């Protein structure tokens, strides 16, 4: 039934509180607010005024000036906006889809703005744009048209060159770029037809459908492992080699540590120390030491490579490390943030070598209760380099070097972990696929990397050091304001996303308590226990992680929601993360009594670091996706077991067991019936026979086609009688 427009009584005296609230909504016509947000924006703090706001909201909702969306969140009635809207355009970032349509994300609105493919203009994915908003239509998503590109996200693109006569096109690898780059013949720069290359956009004429460009670097032939990995790096605009100035500087860094430097540091070389890392690791940036004290307590040292001793602000190494922001871990290689001489040699805490560190040292009893802590510059000498697997074997009862010391550390780490979960930390899990590669980088097999107790041993001490360093600088003492610092923050989840996740779980038979922070953490941890080992485990955990906010770097501390830490930073990996290097420098400065740094300047550094981290994660995922597609290239027609990982109007997404390759069974391949999407219950159903494909259910598929360049895999159903399972149910007779 259509809503009636509210009628106004001309005889009544306007309520000043309602007028204030209505003005707030009109100034933000597409945003939703709850009671607390409105009171805060209006500067209301006393109980009496808050009660007036609450009553006003109730009255406005009854008269349909505002609409209650869910759980106390209100939005201005769209039927009233035509007369009162004062905001007809917004700026935001383009999220372009493969089809050419786009969505604009902007802090000005709660929801994304939809842009039809014919209204995107000359904008591309990631661009900052100005959008003209169309008048609101009842029951429709906010829609608009891109009228100006304010800032390009990028001007270089990676793809395959297709030459035809006197011109050519570069077909981008990135499926979110829906146009090809036109390359005039004089701008081909010796690239051959079919090769992969990097093109720079030079112009996009007003009436042209395609942007113009020139080839700036030839990468080589598609399918070559080095070419493909370099293509991924270039797609995300990571440099393919270090600047010559950076290499020259690193070559001049001395390996030897002077006696003068040693004399300024606390000497941990006589104390038992070890590193625990993956077997293929080369950059060991953290070590643990253990010493038993006379009173029975333990001195545990968390020793971190002192990169700040070697990399000085303003140096070529520092400038390039900042630009890179982080090391990148592709399937077959590491692209380090620092030159190899630093990352793998000078700074790396290799066994039986003296190394400079910045350390956090804790005195704790057998229950891991901390009675004292110390921070400062040290020198260490690692007694042993362990692989995680070696330590795990000892934890499970096997023998090994210095087992007694490792078991003490593991016992203390377990206590720290138990305490963390008691106070509301959420135990997120994620499975990581690993590849066994041949000499040419081609994947010949896959396996799932598991996080075991040995990994947690290291993780819990790193979490402790990160938390305590943040507390040392961030905690207010007396009347003094905390100095500017770099925090690792994690915001609370969006209530709407959380509600949708809870509804999704309920349809799979699981319950969530989202009413309180403590209840939510407990629910998440119980959920992960319930789904452990089940077919839907990985799918639910992946969606749970996407439901949460993303952790980022900031000078504004709001705590870390997922870990339930009020103060948290990144102190423990300066070889591979630039924010950790900033933290080391700031900690040293403040311990020396130096004044606080400029907050705005460091907030800009934090935003850059967060963005580079995001790009690195996307590059790493792209390399995994490529190797998964390459793994299936020679398996066309073969059958595999999988799980239904997604449902859409286009088809059924299936993730294969073991390799975690995800492909789609297009609905056009299901020709035994007319299938429709039951969106509410996450399933596809045959209209006549009732055959059902439900999210999370097991399924047997055959590989139909693999598009290596687009990293896309097409499957068809393996309908052999022997493989029918719970993924295919209710095949009814047609009457």
Image (cartoon, rainbow, N blue to C red):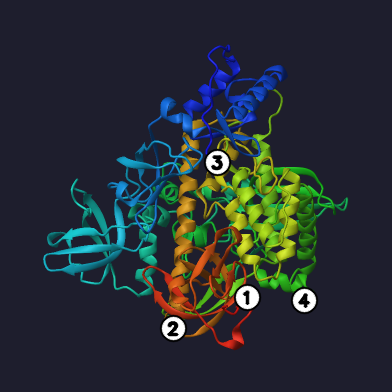
Dot 1 or dot 2: first in sequence order is: 2
Q: Earlier in the sequence, mark 1 or mark 3?
A: 3
Sequence order check, earlier mark of 4 and 2: 4
Report if the CB atoms under discs 4 and 3 are less than 8 Å apart: no
- Give the number of the disc on residue 708: none
Look at the numbered disc 4 and give the secondary structure of its residue.
loop
Q: Is residue 735 left or right of residue 119?
A: right
**Which is nearer the N-term, disc 1 or disc 4?**
4
Residue identifier under label 4: 398
Q: Is residue 490 above or below residue 483?
A: below
Q: CA distance from mark 1 to mark 3?
A: 36 Å
Q: Which mark is residue 730?
A: 1
The answer to whether residue 86 shows anywhere in this view is: no
Side (left or right) of 367 relative to 668: right
- Please indicate, yes or no, whether residue 701 appears anywhere in the rendered image: yes
Which comes sooner in the sequence, label 4 or label 3? 3
Q: Report the residue at 21% width, 71% height from top.
A: 193
Which quadrant of the structure image shows residue 668?
bottom left
Residue nearer the viewer, 126 or 370: 126
Q: Which dot marks residue 636?
A: 2
Mark 1 or 4, closer to the camera: 1
**Cα distance, mark 3 to mark 2?**
53 Å
The nearer-to-camera label among 3 and 2 is: 3
The residues bearing labels 4 and 3 have C-alpha atoms spaced at a distance of 71 Å
Q: Nearer the viewer, mark 4 or mark 2?
A: 2
Q: Residues within 10 Å of mark 4 (few under 14, many from 20)?
A: few
Q: Residues within 10 Å of mark 3 (few under 14, many from 20)?
A: few
- Compared to 237, does 631 lie above or below? below
Q: Identify residue for label 3.
A: 1
The local secondary structure at tag 3 comes to: loop
Position of the N terminus by quadrant: top right
Q: Residues within 10 Å of mark 2 (few under 14, many from 20)?
A: some
């Amino acid at each position: 039934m259509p809503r009636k427009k509210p009628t106004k009584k001309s005889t009544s005296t306007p309520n000043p509180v309602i007028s204030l609230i209505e003005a707030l909504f009109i100034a933000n016509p597409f945003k939703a607010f709850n009671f607390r947000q409105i009171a805060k924006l209006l500067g209301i703090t006393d109980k009496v005024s808050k009660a007036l706001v609450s009553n006003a909201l109730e009255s406005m909702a009854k008269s349909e000036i505002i609409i209650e969306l869910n759980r106390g969140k209100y939005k201005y009635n769209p039927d009233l906006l035509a007369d009162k809207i004062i905001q007809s355009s917004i700026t935001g970032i383009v999220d372009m889809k493969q089809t050419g349509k786009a969505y604009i994300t902007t802090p000005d609105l709660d929801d994304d703005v939809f842009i039809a493919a014919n209204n995107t203009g000359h904008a591309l994915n990631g661009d900052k744009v100005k959008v003209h908003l169309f008048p609101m239509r009842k029951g429709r998503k906010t829609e608009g048209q891109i009228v100006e590109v304010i800032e390009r996200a990028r001007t270089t693109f990676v793809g395959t060159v297709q030459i035809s006569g006197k011109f050519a096109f570069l077909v981008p690898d990135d499926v979110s770029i829906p146009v090809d780059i036109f390359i005039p013949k004089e701008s081909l720069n010796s690239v051959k037809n079919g090769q992969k290359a990097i093109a720079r956009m030079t112009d996009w004429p007003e009436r042209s459908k395609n942007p113009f460009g020139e080839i700036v670097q030839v990468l080589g032939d598609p399918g070559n492992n080095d070419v493909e990995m370099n293509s991924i790096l270039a797609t995300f605009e990571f440099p393919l080699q270090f600047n010559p100035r950076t290499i020259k500087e690193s070559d001049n860094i001395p390996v030897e540590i002077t006696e003068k430097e040693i004399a300024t540091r606390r000497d941990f070389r006589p104390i038992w120390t070890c590193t625990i890392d993956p077997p293929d690791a080369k950059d060991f940036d953290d070590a643990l030491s253990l010493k038993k004290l006379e009173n029975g307590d333990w001195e545990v040292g968390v020793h971190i490579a002192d990169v700040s001793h070697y990399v000085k602000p303003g140096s070529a190494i520092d400038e390039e490390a900042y630009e890179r922001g982080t090391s990148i871990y592709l399937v077959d290689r590491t692209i380090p943030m620092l030159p190899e001489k630093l990352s793998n040699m000078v700074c790396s805490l290799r066994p039986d070598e003296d190394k400079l560190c910045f350390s956090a040292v804790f005195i704790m009893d057998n229950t891991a209760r901390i009675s004292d802590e110390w921070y400062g510059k040290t020198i260490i000498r690692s007694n042993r380099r362990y692989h995680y697997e070696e330590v795990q074997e000892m934890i499970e009862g096997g023998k090994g070097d210095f087992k007694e010391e490792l078991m003490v550390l593991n016992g203390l780490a377990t206590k720290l972990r138990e305490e963390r979960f008691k106070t509301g930390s959420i135990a997120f899990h994620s499975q990581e696929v690993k590849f066994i590669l041949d000499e040419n980088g081609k994947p010949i097999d896959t396996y799932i990397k598991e996080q075991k107790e040995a990994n947690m041993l290291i993780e819990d001490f790193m979490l402790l050091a990160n938390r305590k360093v943040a507390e040392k600088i961030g905690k207010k003492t007396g009347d003094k304001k905390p100095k500017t610092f770099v925090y690792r923050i994690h915001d609370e989840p969006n209530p709407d996303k959380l509600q949708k996740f809870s509804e999704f779980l309920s349809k799979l038979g699981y319950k969530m308590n989202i009413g309180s922070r403590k209840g939510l953490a407990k629910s998440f941890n119980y959920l992960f226990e319930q789904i452990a080992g089940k077919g839907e485990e990985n799918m639910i955990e992946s969606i749970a992680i996407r439901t949460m906010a993303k952790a980022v770097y900031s000078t504004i501390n709001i705590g870390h929601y997922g870990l339930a830490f009020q103060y948290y930073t990144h102190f423990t990996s300066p070889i591979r993360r630039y924010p950790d290097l900033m933290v080391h420098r700031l900690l040293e400065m403040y311990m020396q009594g130096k004044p606080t740094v400029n907050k705005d300047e460091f907030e800009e550094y934090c935003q850059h670091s967060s963005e580079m981290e995001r790009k690195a994660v996307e590059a790493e995922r792209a390399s995994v996706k490529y190797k998964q597609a390459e793994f299936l290239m020679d398996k066309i027609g073969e059958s595999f077991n999988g799980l239904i990982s997604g449902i859409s109007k286009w088809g059924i997404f299936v993730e294969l067991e073991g390799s975690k390759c995800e492909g789609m069974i297009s609905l056009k391949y299901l020709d035994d019936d007319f299938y429709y999407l039951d969106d509410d219950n996450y399933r596809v159903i045959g209209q006549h026979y009732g055959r059902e494909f439900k999210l999370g259910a097991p399924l047997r598929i055959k590989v139909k086609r693999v598009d290596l360049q687009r990293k896309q895999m097409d499957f068809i159903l393996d309908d052999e009688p022997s493989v029918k399972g719970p993924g295919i149910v209710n095949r009814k007779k047609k009457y």
